[in-house]
Image: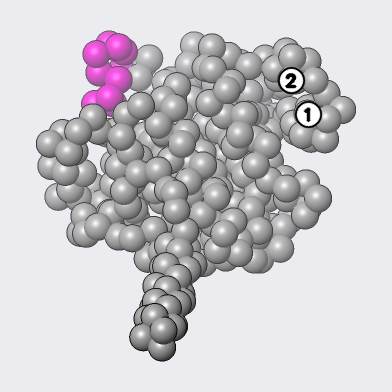
Amino acid sequence: MKKIKLMRGVCFFVGIIILSVVNAVNAVEPPPYFGRMYSGTTLTPLTWNQFFKKIPKGAIVLIGEQHNRPSIQNGQMSVLNGLRKYGHKINVGMEFLDFTSQNFIDNYRSGELSEEDFLQNIKWGDVKFEFYKNQILFPNKDLGEKTFGINSPRWLTGEISKKGISGLSQEGLDLIPPNFQIGRASYQKRFADLMSGHVTSPEAMGRYFEAQSVWDETMAWQILNIANSTQDKETLVVTVGQFHIEYGGGLPYQLQVRGLKRPVIVIEQFLYYNDEDIPFEDLKPSLEFGSKADFIMIVRQD
């Protein structure tokens, strides 16, 4: 009987130790997260715990995406949920929402505007709203967190693509960010390579790059305004198309030019179908342009 009691005591004690270890592991590495995280400079794998410890509160976190991909949106939600667990107060900035629609965004999040009316008022495009709804609704309004539209209106960049900035009406010119600058040369080179099969004349390419630069500059301008109007420890997570942030190009560079004082963290996402297809060769830093991002998240295609 004593042996049985002793064994039960030992089992109970061992069980407590195991439970404590499990709880400690879970406290450090809370599951589940969607995807695998790597250093953007060395491609060294990182645990999610290691990753989140590198994100200071108050940072501007730029998460690249490929549109209409549920796996990419799941990766974004992993970052948002993880930052929440690690104590960040989080605001969200959305490339898909323009800054002139902020009242509609606020009214939708507060429940004063139905989803149908919201989408109609902001003139939502062909991209499926379901892939971005959770990100828009993620900030906790009871904590004073907000979702911001940061882009220029689509009609404006469309007009610039056709006429150039010099051909804009006064209404359009009034929406150009103050102290506007065209994107830097290395970004323009990458843009021209990307668009070479679609745009043939140098004049048209120039107009398209003006529109691209207005897109980036408007987002940088709005992010700077948000940073100046929110507390230093409030983290802003921005979802944006990958090309805008790769190699520190469009958006990160314009934030630097505009004098943003907060740390900027760039996260790229890439899809894979099985372990043999992870595109590590494509993710290595470029001799010409440098690292794609500070961190690279590999997500499995749903």
> Which residue corresponds to the image point at 62% horizontal and 44% vertical from the top-left?
92
Q: Which residue is mark 1?
A: 108
- Element type where label 1 sits in the image: helix
Position of residue 235 measured from the top left corner of the image (x, y, whole percent) = 60, 57
Q: Is residue 23 above or below residue 84?
A: below
- Splitting the image into 4 quarters, where does residue 202 fall? top left
- Camera-side residue: 34 or 23? 23
Q: Which mark is residue 92?
A: none
For the residues labelled 2 and 1, the Cα–Cα distance comes to: 7 Å
Q: Is residue 107 above or below residue 63?
A: above
The answer, for residue 128, to whether it is visible in the render is yes
Q: Residues within 10 Å of mark 2 (few under 14, many from 20)?
A: some
Coloured how? one colour
Position of residue 43 measured from the top left corner of the image (x, y, whole percent) = 21, 55
> Which residue corresponds to the image point at 64% horizontal and 35% vertical from the top-left?
136
Q: Residues within 10 Å of mark 1 (few under 14, many from 20)?
A: some
Position of residue 139 measured from the top left corner of the image (x, y, whole percent) = 68, 46
- Splitting the image into 4 quarters, where does residue 65 fall? top left
Q: Which residue is mark 2?
A: 115
- Amino acid carrying mark 1 in the image: Tyr
Nearer the N terminus, badge 2 or badge 1? 1
Q: Is residue 49 above or below residue 82?
A: below
Q: Is residue 196 magenta?
A: yes
The answer, for residue 187, to whether it is visible in the render is no
Q: Are marks 2 and 1 in contact (CB under 8 Å)?
A: yes
- Amino acid carrying mark 2 in the image: Glu
Which portion, as a residue range, is magenta?
A: 192-202
The C terminus appears in which quarter of the rendering? Answer: top left
> Which residue corresponds to the image point at 47% horizontal and 33% vertical from the top-left?
73
Q: Is residue 278 magenta?
A: no
Position of residue 169 measured from the top left corner of the image (x, y, whole percent) = 67, 17
- Element type where label 2 sits in the image: helix
